[in-house]
Image (cartoon, grey):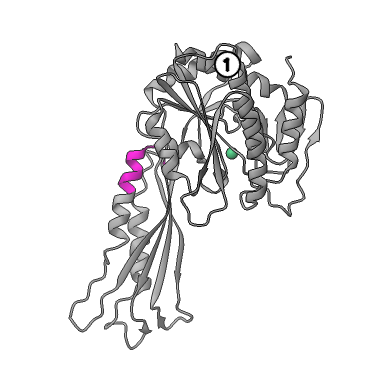
């Protein structure tokens, strides 16, 4: 087994021991600053990219290497889900595995992406330009960077994501997208006994929205539209509320499905079902807020050959049979996706227990997964 240099182990240890919860931007920045040093050593041209959110404390670290016509994005992230006051703060080291916050998600992933560039540097493929991005807000939906990531996607012909591999070592070629909708309904409110015939009822309107939204689910295309909240401001049984709110969560595998759901919700969420029968009745108002609209990326035909190459290389280097699979959760790579763009994710290290206090890294996989990415890029660059 090829081992990592002591310096690389020191670097990873320092990253894991540095709290970098998304809400600890100073900590995130410290991990990125150290990654900046490592990337600079490898010849990347680096810059900090500000967030598009007003007064946002985060910055993304972006670097390029190479000058070739084939553009590839390598994406990793420095933030974690472990808050500053969490009991899980330090790296526990065993000879073959480490346990620690963010050790695979995604500090090990940052290291794998950089080690892959180091492997390439011996004979960096002339045809390739690498765009390397170390994100600060992956765990909270890449907020502040949606347009930056989409721009990268327009430039790229291939995206490689360094989220951890799946627990059995498999990699990822598709991720579901998700949407969150909040629909607020306003009416006049009144007494259930006296006013029922002269008022339009926001509670009933909310129920109609919920029913119609649910019908947008489509099992065959694995699209789910789920009502996750139905609230009114009525305190009692006999009060017609003046406001009601519906919360909806949508999940989809194909971007066309995301667009279909969105266009229906834009109608269901803004045009009242209940209409006044006379001028004396006050109409309801409805407002729609789209709180999340994360695109899916689906397995494109042109990703299959690359995925197969990666699987064969893993078999050769690690001696294990793994697969290419779908992951339910979204990541930075979802925001880089566009129809037809091949994306492979889960190219980070092997391990288990991400987002738990048992987060575990298989130490040897840092090197082997870096070798997999390096040969993938050499192959793709031909
Ligand atoms: Zn992650």
Label 1 element class = helix
Location of residue 79 with respect to 62 vertically, above or below: below
The quarter of the image that holds ligand 1 is top right
Q: Residue furthest left?
A: 278
Q: Residue at x 39, y 28 (%)?
A: 341
Location of residue 366 with respect to 12 vertically, above or below: above
Main SS category, magenta section: helix
Q: Residue at x 43, y 36 (%)?
A: 336
Q: Quadrant of the C terminus?
A: top left
Q: Residue furthest bottom?
A: 194
* Residue 105: percent from left, percent from top: 63, 37
Q: Residues within 10 Å of mark 1 (few under 14, many from 20)?
A: some
Q: Left of 278 or right of it: where is 284?
A: right
* Residue 147: percent from left, percent from top: 41, 44
- In the picture of the structure, the residue carrying the numbered disc 1 is 120
* Residue 258: percent from left, percent from top: 36, 44
Residue 291's image quarter?
A: bottom left
Q: Residue at x 81, y 25 (%)?
A: 95
Magenta-highlighted residues: 252-261
Q: Left of 118 or right of it: where is 227?
A: left
Q: Quadrant of the N terminus?
A: top right
Q: Is residue 314 visible?
A: no
Q: Residue at x 23, y 72 (%)?
A: 275
Location of residue 308 with respect to 215 vertically, above or below: above
Residue 163 is one of the magenta-drawn residues: no
Residue 259's image quarter?
A: top left
Q: Left of 341 or right of it: where is 320?
A: right
Residue 354's image quarter?
A: top right
């Amino acid at each position: 087994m090829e081992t990592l240099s002591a310096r690389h182990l020191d670097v990873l240890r320092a990253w894991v021991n540095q709290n970098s919860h998304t809400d600890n931007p100073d900590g995130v920045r410290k991990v990125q600053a150290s990654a900046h040093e490592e990337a600079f050593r490898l010849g990347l041209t680096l810059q900090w990219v500000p967030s598009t959110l007003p007064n946002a404390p985060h910055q993304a670290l972006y670097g390029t290497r190479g000058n070739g016509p084939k553009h590839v994005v390598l994406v990793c992230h420095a933030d974690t889900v472990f808050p500053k006051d969490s009991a899980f703060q330090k790296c526990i080291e065993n000879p073959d595995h480490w346990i620690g916050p963010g050790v695979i998600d995604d500090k090990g992933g940052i290291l794998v992406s950089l080690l892959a560039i180091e492997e390439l540097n011996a004979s960096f493929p002339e045809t390739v330009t690498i765009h390397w991005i170390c994100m600060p807000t992956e765990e909270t939906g890449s907020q502040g960077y949606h347009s930056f990531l989409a721009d990268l996607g327009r430039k790229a012909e291939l995206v490689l994501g360094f989220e951890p591999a799946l627990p059995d070592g498999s990699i990822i070629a598709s991720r579901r997208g998700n949407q969150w909708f909040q629909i607020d309904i306003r009416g006049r409110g009144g007494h259930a006994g006296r006013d029922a015939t002269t008022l339009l009822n926001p509670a009933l309107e909310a129920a109609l929205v919920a029913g119609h939204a649910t019908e947008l689910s489509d099992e065959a295309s694995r699209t789910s539209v789920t009502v996750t909240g139905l609230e009114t401001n009525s305190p009692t049984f006999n009060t017609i509320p003046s406001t009601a709110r519906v919360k909806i969560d949508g999940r989809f595998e194909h971007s066309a499905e995301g667009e279909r759901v969105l266009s229906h919700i834009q109608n269901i969420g803004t045009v009242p079902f209940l209409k006044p029968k006379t001028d004396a009745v006050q109409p309801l108002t409805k407002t729609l807020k789209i709180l999340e609209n994360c695109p899916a990326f689906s397995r494109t035909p042109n990703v299959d050959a690359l995925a197969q190459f990666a699987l064969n290389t893993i078999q050769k280097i690690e001696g294990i049979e793994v697969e290419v699979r779908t992951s339910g959760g979204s990541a930075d790579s979802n925001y880089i996706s566009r129809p037809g763009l091949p994306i492979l994710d889960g190219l980070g290290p092997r391990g288990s227990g991400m987002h738990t206090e048992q987060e575990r890294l298989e130490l040897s996989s840092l090197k082997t997964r870096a070798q997999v990415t390096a040969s993938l890029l050499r192959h793709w660059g031909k």
